[in-house]
């Protein structure tokens, strides 16, 4: 009986410490961190994630939709070029994040298929989708505007953003003439700390 009481006391202490550590992590985040957002997302593997699950890595983020035939293929190409220029020893500390503005079409299965077809299925590639409210909230954080203009088409800003491992926005480049080298140099600068 004494052993059981001891075991329960230790288990309770471990759970309390874990809960304190989890709440401490959020409190220790800067107030302008995207990891403060509590929305739920699904990745290309169908796993439910929160933005804070990306904490600890430098993030290169773009919002797209996979059925886009105009600007998004250019943005995806820029992301691939950025990824290819990040040193292979540093890539483990970087997440290349593509967030869908069309969650209705971009199911996890669709995102996974898109990732494989575009050779973007290595661990550093993260595809995310959520509901309309979470997607709009995230777009607002990025000052990214988008609007559905037909059943299959969106008008949207073309922005690639960099976040440090604490989730703070470091830099953005907008337009279809994204300066890839500037982004890569910024990523390397963040990684060097």
Image (cartoon, rainbow, N blue to C red):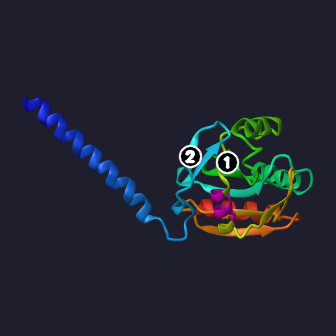
Identify which residue is drawn at 72% across, 35% down.
Answer: 109
Labels 1 and 2 touching (C-beta < 8 A): yes
Residue 120 position, x and y percent, is 76, 41
Q: For this rendering, which residue is in front, 134 or 120?
A: 134
Residue 49 position, x and y percent, is 56, 46
Q: How many marks?
A: 2
Q: In this view, does 5 lie above or below 37?
A: above
Q: Quadrant of residue 57?
A: bottom right
Identify which residue is drawn at 27% across, 44% down.
Answer: 14
Q: In which quarter of the image is residue 155?
A: bottom right
| Residue under label 1 | 128
Q: For this rendering, which residue is in front, 61 or 135?
A: 135
Q: Is residue 1 above or below residue 53?
A: above
SS for tag 1? strand
Structural crowding at the residue carrying mark 1, measured as other residues with C-alpha within 10 Å and reported as few (<14), some (14–19) or many (≥20)? many
Residue 183 position, x and y percent, is 75, 63
Identify which residue is drawn at 65% across, 62% down.
Answer: 138
Magenta stretch containing residue 135, yes or no? yes
Q: For this rendering, which residue is in front, 90 or 165?
A: 165
Horizontal side, residue 119 vs residue 16: left or right: right
Quadrant for the C terminus in the image? bottom right
Would you say the magenta stretch is mainly helix, strand or loop? Answer: helix
Magenta stretch containing residue 105, yes or no? no
Which portion, as a residue range, is magenta? Answer: 133-139
Residue 49, labelled with which disc?
Answer: 2
Structural crowding at the residue carrying mark 2, measured as other residues with C-alpha within 10 Å and reported as few (<14), some (14–19) or many (≥20)? some
Q: Earlier in the sequence, mark 1 or mark 2?
A: 2
Identify which residue is drawn at 85% across, 67% down.
Answer: 175
SS for tag 2? strand
Label 1 – label 2 distance at C-alpha: 9 Å
Q: Is residue 118 above or below residue 170?
A: above
Residue 100, labelled with which disc?
Answer: none
């Amino acid at each position: 009986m004494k052993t059981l009481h001891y075991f329960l006391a230790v288990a309770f202490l471990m759970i309390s410490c874990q809960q304190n550590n989890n709440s401490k992590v959020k409190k220790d985040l800067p107030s302008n961190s995207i990891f403060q957002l509590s929305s739920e997302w699904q990745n290309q593997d169908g796993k439910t994630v929160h933005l804070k699950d990306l904490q600890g890595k430098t993030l290169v983020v773009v919002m797209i939709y996979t059925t886009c035939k105009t600007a998004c293929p250019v943005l995806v190409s820029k992301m691939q070029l950025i990824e290819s220029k990040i040193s292979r020893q540093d890539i483990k500390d970087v997440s290349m994040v593509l967030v869908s503005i069309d969650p209705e079409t971009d199911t996890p299965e669709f995102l996974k298929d898109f990732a494989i077809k575009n050779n973007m299925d290595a661990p550093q590639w993260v595809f995310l989708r959520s509901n309309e409210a979470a997607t709009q909230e995230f777009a607002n954080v990025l000052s990214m505007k988008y609007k559905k203009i037909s059943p299959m088409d969106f008008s949207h800003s073309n922005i690639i953003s960099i976040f440090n491992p604490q989730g703070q926005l470091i830099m953005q480049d907008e337009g279809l003439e994204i300066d890839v080298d500037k982004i890569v140099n910024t990523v390397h600068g963040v990684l060097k700390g």
